Amino acid sequence: MNTNHRPAAASLLKWIGVGLLSVTVVPLLAVVFVLPFAGRVAAAFDYSADLATPQVTPDFSIAHTLDFFFGSLLSTSTQSFPSGTITGKVTGGGTISADDARIPPRSRSFGYVAMGQVVIDSATGASNCTPATPCPAKGHLNYVNHTTGVHINGEVTEITNFQFFATPPGPTKGTATFRGTDTKSGCGTFTVSVTDNGEPGTNDRFGIDCGGETTFGQRQHSGGNSQIHPPQAK
Amino acid sequence: MKRLTTAFVLALFIATTAAASRVLIAAGETSVTGAGTAGFPSGTVFNGVTLTSSQFGKGVVLNPDGSATGDFYNVLDGSTAVGPQTITVTGLVSSGSLNANGSVTFGGNCSLDMGDGTRPSSLPFSVTATSQGLTLVIGTTTLPTQTVIAGGIDIR
């Protein structure tokens, strides 16, 4: 009886050894191999993430079935969005405004980068970031009011709103709001809200509030571009 | 059992590769933002337009692998014999890197509107920026460095 158990025990020990070796050596090899071309590997995984969208969960509702068979004729939903945690990224550079006489064209210049981990709702394209529960972010803002000379400059620390209106394979569109602290003019916490309405950026919008500096909500660009970037894997 | 082990090892390798690349990339991003006005050295001429000053706005993220994303906007104010003329450069950034001296160089494709009624053209462009100014290359023409007068450029 005992002699029958020995091979089984030896086999078990062997596989435990292989398992331990796998979880220690393989990750080490993976890191060593990936170091010289980390960027390309990351880009490849980003690309895969983009291709994977929209990630549609099975939906057998009547509305979805009608939409599936009759498409735009009976369209009840138009797009699904990537689900789960992604890197939300928004960049922009330009001037305002083209739609408000209080802010003549080219009287305000801006340049910004804001990015952070956000969790996207696949049904609405909205994220988990809210003013009450902001998502940690990094980036920077430069803004100049050429009429008054106010220069707002500071690190971006929070995203309080991030929502896709459309994602690849078509153009990416959406809106975002982010916050940070000004270190130049002394206006305190700045809140910037932007909307990407597609390319070129003529219909994009930018707005800022910081102390007494305000654009009275989002104003249409008089030049430049704001971009909500396509979803990237976390 | 052998197949299962092979699949496990392969999955572990792929997962670790993805995670490691992500961590390495995130660690090396550089952001470039700027807004303000700048001046050209006297005597600067581009396509027959004498340039005096400019306005700029940019937000760019540079990745360690040489790729980049972001936006560049530069309005060049000048004049010709017939009066004032404004040239507009609106660029989408696709590549860039941090230079050894702390400056950054990024580029991509831009729309160049000469502001003379002709249709805007699409051209490659690049920008080398420091906290003091920026040097713009449109197509094969390198413009003299624009020195920041108001606002600023931040490289982080």
Image (tube, grey):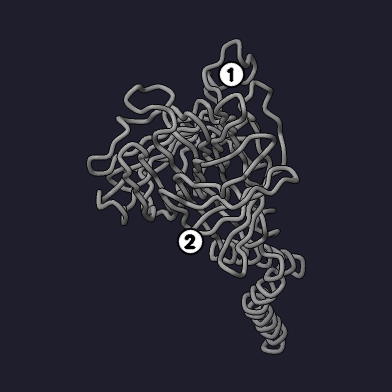
How far from the left and from the top, in percent, is residue A127? 42, 41
The disc labelled 1 sits on which kind of residue?
Asp
SS class of the residue under badge 1? helix
Residue under pointer 1: A67
Res. B156 mark: 2
Res. B110 mark: none
Along the line of sight, which residue is nearer the eye, B85 or A187? B85
Question: Can the viewer see residue A48 in this picture?
Answer: no
Location of residue B104 (image quadrant): bottom right
The disc labelled 2 sits on which kind of residue?
Arg
SS class of the residue under badge 2? loop
Query: Which quadrant of the figure contains the N terminus of chain A?
Result: bottom right
Question: Can the viewer see residue B75 in this picture?
Answer: yes
Q: Is residue B140 above or below residue B105?
A: above
Along the line of sight, which residue is nearer the eye, A119 or A104? A104
Badge 1: chain ID: A
Badge 2: chain ID: B
Point 59% across, 66% down: residue? B24
Location of residue B62 (image quadrant): bottom right
